Amino acid sequence: MSSSPFISNLQVLPLCLIFALCLFDAAITTTTMATSIDDEAKALHNSQWWNDISPVSNISNHCEWTEITCDANARIVQIDIFNTLNVGDKFGKMNFTAFPNLVYLRLVAIGLSGIIPSEIGMLSKLTHLDLSYNYLTGELPVHFSNLTQLVSLEIGHNSIDGVIPDQLIKSLKKLSILDLSDNNFNGSIPWSIGEMTNLTQLILNANSITGRLPSSLCNLTELEKLGVSENQVYGIIPSEIGMLSKLTHLDLSHNYLTGELPVCFSNVTQLVTLDMSNNHIDGVIPYQLKNLKKLSMLDLCYNNFSGSIPWSIGEMTNLTQLNLKANSISGKLPSSLCNLTDLESLRVSENQIGGLIPLEIENLKKLETLDLSRNNLIGSIPSTIGHLTKLKFLDLHRNQINGEIPTGLYFLSSLNLNYNNLTGNIDAELARVFNLDLSHNFLSGQIPVEFCHRSDISIIFLGNEELNNEISIFYSKCHTPSTPITTLGTSSSSTNFHPLKIILPITSLLVILFVAVLIVSRYKMKNKSKYEETVAMDGDMLSIWNYDGKIAFEDIIEATEDFDLRYCIGTGAYGSVYKAQLPSGKIVALKKLHRLESQDPSFDKSFRNEAKMLSEIRHRNIVKLHGFCLHKRCMFLVYEYMERGNLFYALSNDSDASELSWNKRVNIVKGIAHGLSYMHHDCTPTIIHRDITSNNILLNTELEAFISDFGTARFLDPNTSNQTLLVGTHGYIAPELAYTMVVTEKCDVYSFGVVALETMMGRHPGDLISHLSASSARNIMLKDILDQRLPLPSHQRIGTDVILVVTLALACLNSKPKSRPSMHQVAQELLFHRQSLANDFDKISIQQLMNQEAYPVTHTQ
Ligand SMILES: *[C@@H]1O[C@H](CO)[C@@H](O)[C@H](O)[C@H]1NC(C)=O
Ligand SMILES: *[C@@H]1O[C@H](CO)[C@@H](O)[C@H](O)[C@H]1NC(C)=O
Ligand SMILES: *[C@@H]1O[C@H](CO)[C@@H](O)[C@H](O)[C@H]1NC(C)=O
Ligand SMILES: *[C@@H]1O[C@H](CO)[C@@H](O)[C@H](O)[C@H]1NC(C)=O
Ligand SMILES: *[C@@H]1O[C@H](CO)[C@@H](O)[C@H](O)[C@H]1NC(C)=O
Ligand SMILES: *[C@@H]1O[C@H](CO)[C@@H](O)[C@H](O)[C@H]1NC(C)=O
Ligand SMILES: *[C@@H]1O[C@H](CO)[C@@H](O)[C@H](O)[C@H]1NC(C)=O
Ligand SMILES: *[C@@H]1O[C@H](CO)[C@@H](O)[C@H](O)[C@H]1NC(C)=O
Ligand SMILES: *[C@@H]1O[C@H](CO)[C@@H](O)[C@H](O)[C@H]1NC(C)=O
Ligand SMILES: *[C@@H]1O[C@H](CO)[C@@H](O)[C@H](O)[C@H]1NC(C)=O
Ligand SMILES: *[C@@H]1O[C@H](CO)[C@@H](O)[C@H](O)[C@H]1NC(C)=O
């Protein structure tokens, strides 16, 4: 905007454009190309895709834009946009016929909606087409069968429907990658698929595909990845699959497949992952699977496998994850299992396995998850289990295990031993286990005082008859000062101590890493391999970053036991929030939409808004987004966990409120002001939050404020009127919104004013606001509105700050948007707190503060 009017004024642009192009043409002297280059520039400009980016890009040098690559003749050969524009319904505005030389077109996660323009079918040189993660609807254009040079076609994560066109398959002979996952394709997999003999990846996950798997698949001998999960495919698994000798990843999970697992699988020796979970497969687990020496992940859960676990499983030494949950497997756990020393996750729950837990389990040094729950295991827990220091999740509930709980399990984050026959005393160390369930056993003795900080002891120890009395008197032990309380691993001395405070300190190093990764992925988008790093192997998930390479979909599912209600810490307008501890020990908050909600387009949109918004902004007062998953099965955002919950909760809870000293409150208001100032003034385009409330301000252990919940936030596009439906929360919405429906930054300023006053008053200032315009405001004294749970500020500087905050808040509540200060002014004023009224609370009235000539910052000398 600050640059010359030449590029900022859209009206004069076409004229200037021609002028600039002429200069450019003369420079390169290839006059025969003149009109075409002209057309390309014009098509880019007319598309309006770059309108959100101000200043408007210099049209004559489009070859230098990050998203565009030209050849030596300045003809566009590549358009590559990944999550950097918001194109929306302007897909059709791009005149694709103007780019006859285009070979690479990637338009990922830029909000494309509507149908795919059929002109794309004219780009006869195209080799790569990727339209993933948009909102595209309708069927695949028939014209696509003209794209005979295509090597890679990726349209995953849209809402495309219809059958997989036979014609398309017959024409695209060169295709190597076909990804149609997470759409609404129906019908069956065409028999003609066998003609796409160059396919290396065929990804059809999460559609509505029915019918049987065609045996013509066996023709695809180059195939490395085959995914048909989450469809309605039925019938047996064709034994011809054994001929796909190059297959490394096979996912047929979540279908209705029946019959036995064909023995021929043992021929597919390159397999690294094999997922057959959630089908109706029966019979025994073939011992020949041992030939799959490279197999790292074997998932057969939720089927009807019977018989016992083959002894030969001990030969699949590359296994890191083995899941046999929810089958009809019987027999004992073979001790050969303990030869699988790379195993990180072992789940055999919900079967009929008897016998003992093998002592050799201690060989599985890399084990992080061990779930043997809901079986018929007997004997005691091997004491050596404490040697598995990587173990985070140990679940043995509902077995017949007896004996004592071994010592040294304090490093677990989840231990579930309910419904067993355990006896003996309770180890004080167990108080450190984040999710603990020892209910329905025969434990005895005393509950150690180390449990005082936990509010869940009645759940943890329920149904241990000898502890009943102990539970009822337990908390009285905690508060007697004569009982020495030895807290674990920290100097924290209050009974308020919470394990999170020690387990979780989020290392700033990793945060820096996060920012670095984000920067790399945002600004090196042209680098295809970088992109691939961010997309999980199964194509199920788009995560903007991989938290130290380790936040995986599975970790999240594991940590929350598939979003079990026990981990739910709140439900908001746009889904539920869960708390999860990852295998790394890090605690994160997950915001999840349930499937029903996520099918509602407005939820979906709000979710994507939030993901997009947060991935683009970084500020110390804005909650950090670690990653997200967009998938039909579940959609969630992964955030930094905020230990102290939201501001509303902190203010309404008396003990928290008294911990929120005036100093802390002023800092909270400063934090919100800085975050908002950044969104309004340092982001391009401007971001308006639109739902600033005390509910959406989160607090960390230091009681610093973080703005969250960007569900309704949107970019302030300078070219639109910003007329929208009324969103926001009653009691925080600026009055003008009720009649103008025009959203501006000043709406956030108003909501900020409400939250700032609320922070000082300790309650929503509804009554006060309604009095402000009336003459009765004259009689309201400042000291009477300040939170009565705190003594009036005694310190001079803090007193001054409190007065300043209230003064600014009142200015923000001005009913005329134009008279409100900007967030920048507010933030600056709070930063350089200037001398305001004398610090005499008895004498200051609200009227006086309102009379402070608009707001102080306008008087800068
Ligand atoms: C646009 O780009 C051309 C070529 O790079 C340059 O000569 C010209 O000064 C630029 N115009 C503006 C207004 O930046
Ligand atoms: C699209 O571009 C082609 C080739 O440059 C041109 O002939 C055609 O008129 C353009 N169409 C529109 C609608 O601008
Ligand atoms: C394919 O392209 C040819 C010319 O290149 C055109 O005549 C034909 O209509 C196109 N077919 C489809 C299905 O678009
Ligand atoms: C299949 O791929 C190979 C090498 O990748 C290539 O040489 C061959 O031409 C392709 N086949 C077709 C029909 O395009
Ligand atoms: C596929 O879905 C479309 C509408 O989405 C419907 O018209 C068509 O009948 C369906 N075809 C099959 C084979 O189910
Ligand atoms: C297998 O591929 C060949 C060409 O490589 C083709 O002629 C044949 O029809 C295909 N078979 C099936 C069952 O698709
Ligand atoms: C395994 O592969 C070999 C050669 O690759 C083939 O002869 C044999 O029939 C295959 N066995 C099965 C069960 O598919
Ligand atoms: C086992 O996995 C490792 C890496 O995970 C790989 O280097 C090794 O080759 C694999 N072993 C076999 C037999 O494939
Ligand atoms: C599972 O298999 C057993 C036989 O092994 C059979 O009796 C049972 O009905 C099957 N259950 C289901 C749900 O198919
Ligand atoms: C473990 O592996 C070794 C060598 O790989 C083998 O000799 C031994 O029998 C295996 N043990 C079990 C219990 O499978
Ligand atoms: C576990 O306790 C139950 C209930 O007291 C008892 O019926 C069962 O026999 C016990 N099992 C073992 C293995 O001790």
Image: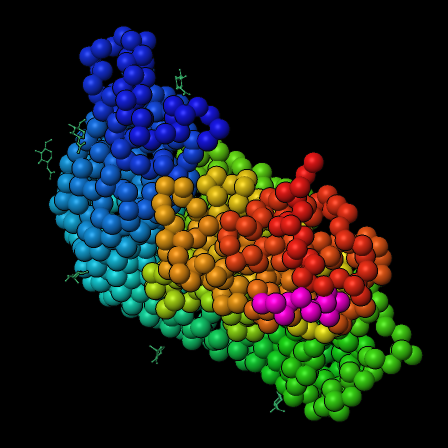
Q: Residue 127: x percent and y percent? A: 26, 32
Q: Is residue 550 magenta?
A: no
Does residue 130 lie above or below 785 as drawn?
Answer: above
Per the rendered image, the range of residues in magenta is 774-787
**Left or right, residue 166 beside residue 393:** left
Q: How is the protein colored in the picture?
A: rainbow
Q: Residue at x 40, y 53 (%)?
A: 742
Q: Residue at x 31, y 51 (%)?
A: 135
Q: Quadrant of the C terminus?
A: top right
| Identity of the residue furthest to the right in this view | 482
Note whether residue 562 is visible: no
| Identity of the residue furthest to the front in this view | 775
**Left or right, residue 106 beside residue 550:** left
Q: Is residue 779 magenta?
A: yes
Q: Residue 599: x percent and y percent? A: 34, 64
User: How many numbered discs, if any?
Assistant: 0
**Left or right, residue 462 beside residue 545:** right
Note whether residue 725 is visible: yes
Q: Residue 617: x percent and y percent? A: 53, 44
Q: Residue at x 75, y 62 (%)?
A: 844
The overriding secondary structure of the stretch rendered in magenta is: helix
Q: Quadrant of residue 122?
A: top left
Q: Residue at x 22, y 34 (%)?
A: 95
Nearer to us in this view, 181 or 293: 181
Q: Residue 372: x percent and y percent? A: 55, 71
Nearer to us in this view, 62 or 482: 62
Q: Quadrant of ligand 1?
A: top left
